[in-house]
Image: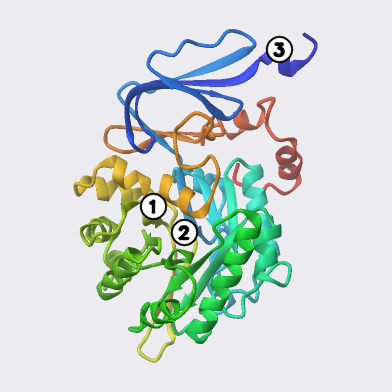
Amino acid sequence: MADLRAARGVPCLLVRGGTVFAPEPLGRVDILCVFGRIAALGPDLAQPPPPFACEVVDARGRYVLPGLVDGHVHILGGGGEGGPATRAPEVTATALLSAGVTTVVGLLGFDGVMRSLASLLAKARALAAEGVAAWIYTGSYQIPPATITGDVERDIALVGEVVGVGEVAIADARASQADPADVVRLAARARIGGLLAGKPGLLHLHVGDAPSGLRRLRAAVAASDLPAAQFYPTHVNRRRPLLHEAAAFAREGAPLDVTAACRPELGEPEAVPPEEALPLLLREGVDPARLTLSSDGNGSLPVFDAAGRVVEVGVGSLRVLWESLQKAVRAGLPLATALAFATRNPARILGLPRKGAIEPGADADLLVVSPELEIERVVVAGRIWDPAAPQAWEERPEARPAIRSARAPFGQTAW
Ligand SMILES: [Zn+2]
């Protein structure tokens, strides 16, 4: 047994006795994780024999949930609407994990000039090296879009991390004011790239607060040969009329993303908060599988005056995603229903393999949550992430050596 790795055994984690939501309710079952994946689910699972070195988490009296999949985060920092001093900062793996987010999809947003997709891709890879699974969108607010290879189709087809194009802005004074037919043509290119790569290749649309909402786009989609399912609008809860219009679009087949940060107390007086917006969409006959909830974390929250000048800029929080789920459940939405909006649904809609569900073969990304819905533990890739002991995490034999060597001289990563 000269091999240290063999001496320490095969990495294994057994989560015992928790009430599991996968996100559908599974009751009290144990979860056995081996090599970062869920190997088995069932009552009273036995500890595997050596060489499996099994760590045991006692989850009795707790909920065990999939790690959150946050499908809309400005991982490089968003904003800049008020000049360079208003650029929001980059996210850290620590900030994501402590918000319960184990999978993230990053995007550029408003600034496709001073921030590049190459940097976004590098940031996603840095997060992945630190334990947070990360994908990105190519493009930014603008049309024609920013790209990595010079072409949206090629970005989606050739770059594994690219899930689609977005967030492309419509109905917003910060958008390119493109002809809706150009927006549809962009979606067609994303679809082609997606078909070539075996990805959904969606067009993720930032819908701004202009009264036109989704009206022009829906007319252009109806006049095209593309299915509504190719368009994935976000921020649909920023105004009540937009929410109703989005419900109609979803009934035609479009997936919809509700923004957790769109709420009156966060500077959007007309917003319908998720705990109200999601039940409203369900009452309006939207298929629950088409609904997602994302944070818009680290985006800027600019406040404009009547003349369109920026008077204030805030930075979006990542925790707002979990807080919105808490509020939705406390407002009466079943936990399994609410949870699917930020776990299984975004993983399925965006085509993220092995994410957003607790099932054999899935990545072992889990949250252990108190009965009061406070996150107590985060398990990522089958290991317990302990914010109080980042060192212990890194010293594990399986820890990626790249983290240690990159951290030492710069010390910029928070863990
Ligand atoms: Zn946006």
Quick check: is the Cβ at mark 1 less than 8 Å away from ligand 1?
no
Which secondary structure, mark 1? helix
Q: Amino acid at mark 2?
A: Gly
Q: Which residue lies under the disc numbered 1? A: 321
Q: Are marks 1 and 2 in contact (CB under 8 Å)?
A: yes
- Residue 16 percent location from the top left of the image: 41, 19
User: Is tag 1's residue or tag 2's residue first in the polypeptide sequence?
Assistant: 2
The residue lying toward the viewer, choosing from 413 and 26, is 26
Q: Is residue 197 above or below residue 369?
A: below
The residue wearing badge 3 is: 7
**Residue at image location 45% in from the left, 71% down from the top:** 206
Q: Quadrant of residue 304?
A: bottom left
Image quadrant for the N terminus? top right
Q: In this view of the protein, can residue 186 be seen by the observer?
A: yes
Q: Secondary structure at mark 2?
A: loop
**Residue 144 placement (x, y as % from top left):** 62, 80
Q: Which mark is residue 297?
A: 2
Residue at the location (57% across, 50% down)? 92
